[in-house]
Structures are given as structure tokens and as C-alpha cells.
Image: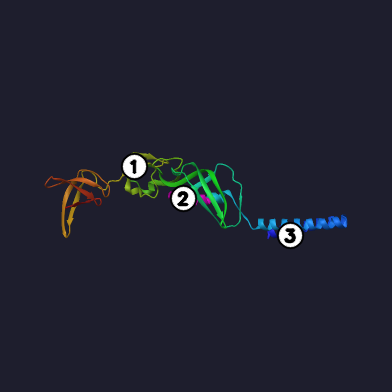
Amino acid sequence: MIARTLILLMASAIAAEAQLAGLLAPVGVAKAQAQNDSAQLERVVKRLQVEAGRHSLDADTLLREVGKELTTRFGVNGELRLSLVRPWGPVSMPAQDFSVSVTEAPGEGLASSFMVKVKVVAAAEEVGEWTLAVRAQLLQEMWAASGRIERGQTLRRDLLAVQRVDVLRDRQAFIPADLDPTTLETAQSIVSPRLLVRRDVADRPLVRKGQVVEVVAKQGLLAISMKALALEAGPAGALIRLRNIQSQKEFSGQILNESKVQVQF
């Protein structure tokens, strides 16, 4: 509607100017002027019609599509935010629907700043290909202490808080918030609001050294159960050394739960 209005206003202005020139000029000159004005009017109208059918691609829209492409390519977990190092002027496109493809990405993976080459296509027409210098943030949710947590304490959700961390800027081995904290215990005391890193925790052992456990041995329909002393601590699935309480013989078994270990014949 706006484009159509502009076309009509421009045409009216040119027509009025041509009419005034015709009144003031001699007949021959006026006729030639009218022909020139008519051609000019036609060119202006066509140009406005072409421009009215085009759309612009701004920086935010471009970066949003580039971010989607990079997220898929690198299997990104979290929110990827991009910004341009240099200003970007809107680019004209022949259609509203368009696609952005990343033709060259950083081979070493995402970083806080990198170069990326992109191509934009709209209405089967290549709009352009550019090499962009971008800054990046990758925000992921990590566990942080919400108070004081003592050494050797089993982690619980009520002891922790979730914080979003830019892992491209701070590349420590943080503990992700999608990990069940009850499978961990602290290796040292932690005070809020510190983020938990791998050296702060250890896998919580289901069986501890010196604990008496039930040992189950199965083969087909045959099953044997006995008591044994754990000579090592370990989490679920770990293989630990055991000692038969009666025979004092040592053997290995896999931890099933907090009181049961399985051995194979």
C-alpha cells in the first residue's frame, strides 16, 4: 500500500511538472519535452515497482539464521549468541523467504571470536556471499553452590543453584545442570556462589571400603548368594575387589546397588 502510494505521488508530481513545462514552452519544444517526461515517468514507475517488491535482510535476522546453522553443524548444547565485529547495512532481497548457508566454518570449533563465510539465497537468486567476523557466547546451565557444602557430602538439588555460563569464555570443567547431582559427592568444601568444577566432586560410591555386601553369582537357572567384604569403594557399575568372609578368598565383582555386587562364573 505504501509503495503504491509513493508510485502514484511520484507520477502525479512528474505529470504536473510536465504540464507546467508544456504551458511555458513553444509547441515543438513542448512536444519533445512531453515525450521525454513520459519516458522518465515510465522509468520511475518501473523502478518503484521493482523496489516495492523487494525485501531487506538486516544483521539480527542474518545472525539468527547463521546461529541455527552453526548450532546444527557443531551439535551445540545451550544458547548460542552471535554479534558482528563490524557494522552491517541491510541487504535488498527479491523475496521475503530466503535461506542462509554456512559455506566455511572454523575448523577448530566455536570460539569467543571467529570468521565464518555465509551465502544468502532468495527466490532462487543468490543475494550474496560474505565473510563475517563474529563474536560468540555459548550459554549453558551449570551447578553452583547455594550455600556451604562440606567435604564428603552427597550433593542434593536443595544445596545447589543453576547458573548460566559462557563456556566459550570460561573453559573450565563445570558440572552441567542436566547431570543428577545425587550421583556425586564433594571432594572439598564449597561455598556459595562458586560454580562446581570436576575437581570439586567425585562419583558418589554406592559401596564403600570395609562394607559388607551381598554377592550374587548367576549362571542360567543356578544362583548362589554369599556375604563378602568390600576391599574398595566404587560407584554403580564399577568393578571392585571383594573378600569372601568365610573362605577369605579374594575376587572381583560389579556393583549393582548400595548393598549388592554381582560376579560371573
Please state which amino acid type lies under the numbered disc 1: Val
Q: Which residues are magenta?
A: 64-77
Going by the numbered disc 2, the residue's amino acid type is: Thr
Please tell me how crowded label 3 is: few (under 14), some (14-19), or many (20+) other residues with Cα within 10 Å: few
Separation of disc 2 and disc 3 at Cα? 46 Å
Whichever of labels 2 and 3 marks the residue nearer the N terminus, that label is 3
Examine the image and state in which quarter residue 153 appears: top left
Residue drawn 70% across the image and 58% down it: 46
Q: Which of the labelled discs sits on residue 71, or is there none?
A: 2
258 lies left or right of 132: left
- Which is in the foreground here, disc 3 or disc 1? 3
Q: Main secondary structure of the magenta part?
A: helix
Q: Quadrant of the N terminus?
A: bottom right
Is residue 70 highlighted in magenta?
yes
Type of residue at label 3?
A: Leu
Kindly identify which residue carries mark 1. Answer: 201
Residues at badges 3 and 1 in contact (C-beta under 8 Å)? no
| Disc ID at residue 82 | none
Viewer-nearest residue: 82 or 53? 53
Q: Residues within 10 Å of mark 2 (few under 14, many from 20)?
A: some
Q: Residue at the location (35% across, 48% down)?
A: 181
Q: Position of residue 262 (x, y in %)?
A: 21, 52
Quarter of the rendering containing residue 232: top left
**150 horizontally vs 125: left or right:** left
CB atoms of marks 2 and 3 within 8 Å: no
Foreground mark, 2 or 3, reads 3
Q: Which residue is mark 3?
A: 8
Q: Earlier in the sequence, mark 3 or mark 1?
A: 3
Q: CA distance from mark 3 to mark 1?
A: 73 Å
Q: Secondary structure at mark 3?
A: helix
